[in-house]
Image (cartoon, rainbow, N blue to C red):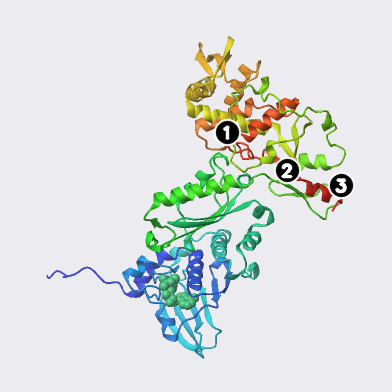
Amino acid sequence: MIEMSSVINILPDHLANKIAAGEVVQRPESVVKELLENCLDAGAESIAVTVENAGKTLIRIVDDGKGMSGEDAEKAFLRHATSKIASYEDLENVRTLGFRGEALASIAAVAQVELRTRREGTEVGTLVRIEGGEVKERSGTAHPRGTGISVRNLFFNTPARRSFLKSNNTEFKHIYDTVQRLALSRPDVALEFTSDGDTILALPSQRIEDRLTTLFGDRQFAAMVPVREETELLTVEGFLGKPDFARRSKVDQYLFLNGRFIVSRSINHAVFSGYEHLVEKGNFPFFMLSLTLDPRKVDVNVHPSKMEVKFSDEQNVYRIVASVVRKALGRHDLVPTVEFTPSSPAFGSSFRHTAQPRLDVPVAAWTGGSALPSAAPEQLPFDLGPTLDAAFSAPAAPLTTPAAGREPEAMEPIAMWQLHSKYILAQIRTGLMIIDQHVAHERILYEKALQRMRDTVPTSQQLLFPQTVALSAGDFTLVRDVLPFLRSIGFETSEFGKNTVLLEGVPPEVKAGTETSILQDILDEFKNNQLRVKLDASDNIAKSFSCKAAIKAGEKLSETEMRSLVDQLFATAMPYVCPHGRPVLIKVSLQELDRRFFRT
Ligand code: ADP
Ligand code: MG
């Protein structure tokens, strides 16, 4: 018996392609992504995408790019056939979206593909039909300049893969996301997207602002701030969503690197870090950022999907992105403004709020007519007086100095009124500012609490008569767990028998008489927060404390108290949003009022 000398087979190409296809083509969406990338690499100015059955039975993509010669039209389907790189040096310096030369070969291995293409300057175009990797037809055909590829019955010859496909809804959603990403990365390219005969998108070549508006709507676009920053290492540009537009899910984050949509935990983290304390943990802000940097400083060949990248200088990229975001958010007026729809009837309550619809309620009640504050402003004292009052007996020093140039008008209100013991109305240079007294105080206390945690010098007010607080067994354990944080913001407690704590000191902001109830309130809020979002224990304590110790709606404030509150609010790092991401104040401009009263 002779032993076989070799057991290793070289797989025939069509089989190798079928296997390779598994990496590149996971679902209809991957086909759409690869074909769209090819269109852009071919310099297309307009692209039409058609799908049927969520791409399962048909994906057709037609572009007006440079097209292919008859010879290339067939070559394109060979594995590692690419016109985009020729050498290792080219790979180091990739500027196109494709470069691996795998997509068409992979797609053709697992579907029925028809390619029609014509290059500029050639009379006839080419048609190539290929099924499961086998060329079935090659002929001349009439075709406008550019390329059209139809991919039918994806995975027709790989039933196992086909059975992994999800419902049409899910597969469609994936395709839509990919088309949308492309639409965002290249607003200059016209794009049409049709699904089962319905036009889903019909986007002309347009400015990025218009494209964002078309894709996300006026309201969301109004809540975006533009960023642009150029450094030696990289350029960062795009749009950041205002914090109060943050959402529970991570769906609206768009990151592009040299025109390619990428996924990067590290860059996402950098962006989110710029939003720290502006957005409740567990919520995610919208962002669309394009990074441009020397292709030699980034490796895009990490994964067949080309969505992962490696930066050679990741730390610096992180640092720059984080600081660009922080700066941009700090510079922009994050105050929601109320705008009346110009066409609305004078006393109707329909007006548009540019940030959050729920604010319509209080303001609408006010604009409804008669509820204008009755206190005549002339009677109020104008001096800015001593800033602190019993209710605000916290250390007077502002935590941070307000950023230069931000809201100077807010610092010099001429008059203030309290509306329904709930809102503070202040005259500012540009019109009227309406502050929610509870959330304003919440923001102040929250930053104080965080500051004290950082300083590690607790400011506690000793109670003359220490009080015992009986707790449930669970809350008692909770107090033990979070004791260091409670202590750091000013609670002094010690254990006092079974499930009972002795309260000896409280933060100075705690109102007399509420010492014992506030501890219980904080624990309850802490648990609530735990259920809803993932927060650090320290952040949760700071939030729970600020929420419970803050003045409530319904508390009457004196003029001095209101001034003090507003002063302290504008001394915080972020006066416009409460720790939960809700707006603290809104402004109504004089122009809006004038328009409302037909003065213009
Ligand atoms: P890659 O994009 O990595 O080069 P593909 O398999 O996606 O590999 O495409 C192979 C080649 O086919 C490309 O390099 C390009 O020359 C050609 N090609 C594919 N699609 C188009 C298109 N829409 N227009 C012009 N040329 C195309
Ligand atoms: Mg490609």
Residue at image mark 1:
529
Q: Amino acid at mark 2?
A: Lys
Question: Is disc 3 placed on a helix, strand or loop?
Answer: loop
For the residue pair 284 and 435, the one nearer the viewer reads as 435
Q: CA distance from mark 3 to mark 1?
A: 40 Å
Q: Nearer the viewer, residue 285 or 200?
A: 285
Mark 3 lies on residue = 347
Mark 3, other Cα within 10 Å: few <14 / some 14–19 / many ≥20: few
Residue 432: x and y in percent read: 76, 41
**Mark sitting earlier along the chain (3/2):** 3
Task: For label 2, count other residues whose C-alpha is less than 10 Å away and answer few (under 14), some (14-19) or many (20+).
Answer: many
Q: CA distance from mark 2 to mark 1?
A: 30 Å
Q: Tell me where residue 350 appears, x and y as whole percent.
A: 80, 49
Tell me the quarter of the picture where residue 546 sits.
top right
Q: Residues within 10 Å of mark 1 (few under 14, many from 20)?
A: some
Which residue is at the far left? 1
**Number of marks in the rendered image:** 3
Whichever of callouts 2 and 1 sits on the residue coming sooner in the sequence is: 1
Reading the image, the residue beneath label 2 is 587
Left or right: 498 as drawn, with respect to 296: right
Relative horizontal placement of residue 208, taking residue 301 as reference (left or right):
right
Residue at mark 1: C-beta within 8 A of ligand 2 = no
Q: Amino acid at mark 3?
A: Phe
* Residue drawn 63% across the image and 19% down it: 517
Label 1: element kind: helix
Q: Is residue 464 above or below residue 391?
A: above
Q: Residue 592: give x, y in percent of width and height.
A: 79, 49
Ligand 2: quadrant of the figure? bottom left
Mark 3 vs mark 1: which is more N-terminal? 3
Q: Nearer the viewer, mark 3 or mark 1?
A: 3
